[in-house]
Image (spheres, rainbow, N blue to C red):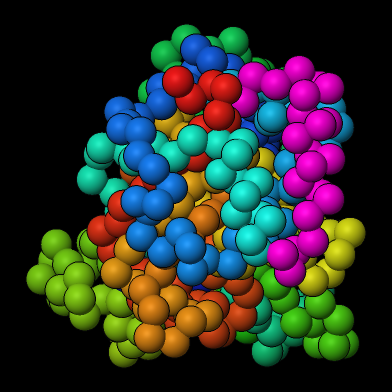
Amino acid sequence: MASCGRTAGRAGIGLLLALCAPIVPGSLTGEAAAMSADQVSLPTMTEIAFAAIPGWQEDDLGKALSAFTRFCVPPFRFLQAEPFGHTEQEAADLCRAAKAIPASDTDAARSFFETRFTPFRIEASGFVTGYFEPELPASRVQTPDYSAPLLKAPAGLETITEDNRPEGWPAELSHGRRTAKGLVPLPDRGAIMDGALEDDHLELVWLADPVDAYFVHVQGSARLRLTDGSVMRIGYAGKAGYPYTSIARVLVERGEGTPEELTMAGLRKWLDDNSDRRDALFRENRSFIFFREVTPENPEDGPVGAANLPLVAGRSLAVDPGHIPYGLPVFVAAGIADPDRTGSQFQRLLIADDTGSAIRGPARGDIFTGSGERAGKIAGEIRHKADMILLLPGSKAR
């Protein structure tokens, strides 16, 4: 689902994805619960006027409002959490007002945000990257042309918490496997590549290219075009638990390229030119991701993010939920070319609804750019400083 970003995808993963850690949707492991007040530390901020937000008047806020109303599902779990702090009735009233505004009425949408929220500029230096959902050819069965598997989660996979952590468990190992002998570590990427899980028969789907399969691991989700013409969506289902290592960064440290050279295209070229060294490089990243098939209610929806909602291209923002709670509108102004407005910079209101292991800090964001090749190209270009402005509920902001 993205910064070293939520991570861009295989077809066009950008420098951020290549060099940084993957985003893994917390919602699929039960980690998307609304943060309680004592879990969230809002950034240091300064109140400003809406008129002082660059691009506020030009943004199509009807699209932002539509993205916001995804949180308007009873019992309004996120809207009842801080900093919203609404009662269920208050959340219902807020959502009723939001849903009454047509998506085409950007002026009414602007008025809604201006009357219901107060803008605060985050004082920390902001930085944004981009991520997307790739579309790749795939097969449900192994064939000579499709031989690179993506695996389902093994039975007994558990996230390690303070409640279940065995004595002496490695601090860096985030997951384990429940067996008759208790929780035990799973094999890492290298061991799995050597067949450590073959007897479990975990193959979910097969890709044509092992490089594509690797980058699906970086991305955490994908849209697959199957051999029969149908579409399959896959999402994160857990991981082996080992820390992520950027293979692009490994190459940089070895002097085999610069960060500017090892963009998605540069990294793929290195992997193509050095196929005899490819698997050894993959093993440097011990992290291994498991997947599940996802069946969205609307096939046109984006992948599900950490707030357990379908992501919206150009309006979903992955954040650090320890600083920015899910559901908050966040205005982002960055020196990125706006993909929807020729000649304009990226200045628009997004909604915090996702996170990722590389998204850490009070002003760190990852912009979801959509699905497919064009979205991948857009995501791969985003690696910019940014001004970030939180819109806090008016009654809670002062």
Rendered location of residue 191, percent (x, y):
49, 52
Residue 311 picture quarter: bottom right
Range drawn in magenta: 84-105
Judge from the rendering whether residue 44 lies leftward or rightward of residue 55; answer left or right.
left
In percent of the image, x 15 and y 74: which residue is there? 258
Rendered location of residue 277, percent (x, y):
32, 76
In percent of the image, x 39 and y 43: which residue is there? 49
Q: Is 241 above or below relative to 280?
A: above
Image quarter hosting the N terminus: bottom right
Was residue 56 drawn as part of the magenta stretch in this picture?
Answer: no
Was residue 103 drawn as part of the magenta stretch in this picture?
Answer: yes
Q: Is 59 above or below relative to 39?
A: below
Q: Nearer the viewer, residue 118 or 12?
A: 118
Tell me if residue 181 can be seen: yes
Q: Which of 112 and 207 is in front in this view?
A: 112
Judge from the rendering whether residue 286 lies leftward or rightward of residue 334; answer left or right.
right
Tell me if residue 26 can be seen: no
Residue 130 picture quarter: bottom left
Rendered location of residue 261, percent (x, y):
21, 80
